[in-house]
Image (cartoon, rainbow, N blue to C red):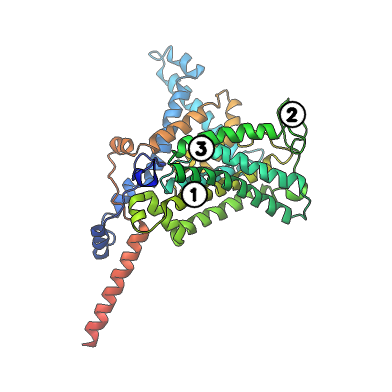
Amino acid sequence: MTDEQQPTTSPTASAEPAPQPSERQLEEAKRNPWEGVWRDILGGNVLRSIVAVLLAILIGSLIVVFTDKRVIDAMGYFAARPGDTFDAMGQVIGSAYGAIFNGAVYNPTRGFAPLFNTLKYATPLIAAGLGLAVAFRAGLFNIGGQGQMLAGAFLAGIVGAQWQLPMGLHFVVALLAGIAGASIWAAMVGWLKAQTGAHEVILTIMFNWIAYWGLTYLLKQPPFNGPRAAGNPKAGPIHETAWLPELGPMSIGIVLVLLAAVAFWWLFERSTVGFRIRAVGINPNAARTAGIDVKVMTVVTMALSGAFMGIASATQVLGEFRTGYTNLVDEGIGFSAITVALLGGNHPVGVVFAGLLFGALRAGQAGMQTVGISPDIIPVIQGIIVLFVAAPPLIRAIFRLPKPTGLRLADRIAASREAGGAKSAAQKAEANR
């Protein structure tokens, strides 16, 4: 399929792309900037994401309750003493989410130490979620996070383990190497799509396997391997000068990804490149007519998407896996990031909060075993969240939420300022008469 033959829409992070305001809507917004704002709030991504999380927690609670032995035993004599069943249900739910809270936020014996575990797990999730959100904004369904993280990990690991540089500089160079590795790996997918019309989903899946088995082979070779762990290929340890710096009880990684979120916001709200990416995502044919080179923007978008994935891989290699990483260094983050981007609505603020939520779920997962509840319920909750977030009409049908107008808050603020300026100018003109 040639570039001219490509469809006007591509798979995106949502089953329902965000509606775009028409010229008529923008003109009406200038006359009444805040008309329909409640419609946008009730039908927008934020409320939909909150509802999706609450529904997932509710369904997860029901699954936990009706598979717990204490509840099942109490239900055996429900007709005689129904209160026992409800007491057992309350104890199970309280134990489950109490364990998550103790493992992710605050523990009476450890204080806020679990919160730093949440931040540690959230760091690569936020960076990877931002990377996938870049591609989703352009209508590209990038599911190659695993391969891009492995490519970034390989270069970051080489610099961190084999180069000799001063402390501080060594970390920066290793971080940039990880960003470059993931960016190049993703850009190759963009180039192949632009030149051949091959679908990015197929390409990224294949590139995931190439990266996985390629890294597995390289980690067995003398220049790159280190001590073996249970027969699994493993890289050598990272020099201490390249370790992820620490800020007290937490690493600097969370600061890096927050800065990356700010960079994401600037890219799409203030830069020409971000405007072109959004234009291609909305309608590539219209963007081409406006003079935007869709092929070039496809490559640029994938490269930028990979750059954020590279931050995630570098924080893994230089932090959690600094004693030596394996071909499992991505820890499934490349795929979990799809959920993070979905839940965050491809917006940097949303992605940060979604990453923190999933980081908290992961940090609290281990604690559930101590209260006799299987931690496998956490992936179930994550899957249910994806189901509801990816199906906006389903959420609207259940809760009768309106469809948003498509006007952004920034559009309304700009219209309000313009209307206020016009009113002020009219008043001055009237006063001068």
Question: At x 48% / y 57%, what residue is drawn?
Answer: 267
Name the residue nearer the viewer: 364 or 187: 187
- Residue 219 drawn above or below residue 173: above
Q: How crowded is mark 1: few (under 14 residues within 10 Å), some or many (20 or more)?
A: many
Looking at the rendered structure, the kind of residue marked 2 is Ala
Q: How far apart are the two marked residues, 1 and 3, measured between alpha carbons?
A: 13 Å
Q: Residue 96 carries which label?
A: none
Label 2 close to label 1 by CB (< 8 Å): no
- Residue 156 drawn at (x, y percent): 67, 46
Q: Is residue 304 left or right of residue 52?
A: right
Question: At x 54% / y 33%, what residue is drawn?
Answer: 98
Q: How far apart are the two marked residues, 2 and 1, measured between alpha carbons?
A: 38 Å
- Residue 387 drawn above or below residue 177: above
Name the residue nearer the viewer: 431 or 22: 22
- Residue highlighted by disc 2: 229
Q: Nearer the viewer, mark 2 or mark 1?
A: 1
Looking at the rendered structure, the kind of residue marked 3 is Thr
Label 2 close to label 3 by CB (< 8 Å): no
- Residue 402 drawn at (x, y percent): 27, 44
Q: Which of marks 2 and 3 is in front?
A: 3
- Residue 287 drawn above or below residue 53: below
SS for tag 3?
helix
Looking at the rendered structure, the kind of residue marked 1 is Val
Q: Of label 2 and label 1, which has the lower sequence position?
A: 2
Q: In this view, does 376 lie to the left or right of 117?
A: left
Q: Residue 204 carries which label?
A: 3
Residue 207 sits in which quadrant?
Answer: top right
Question: At x 68% / y 54%, what residue is drawn?
Answer: 172
Q: Please state, as top left, top right, bottom left or bottom right, where the N terminus lies in the image.
A: top left
Q: Of label 1 and label 3, which has the lower sequence position?
A: 3
Q: Which mark is residue 299?
A: 1
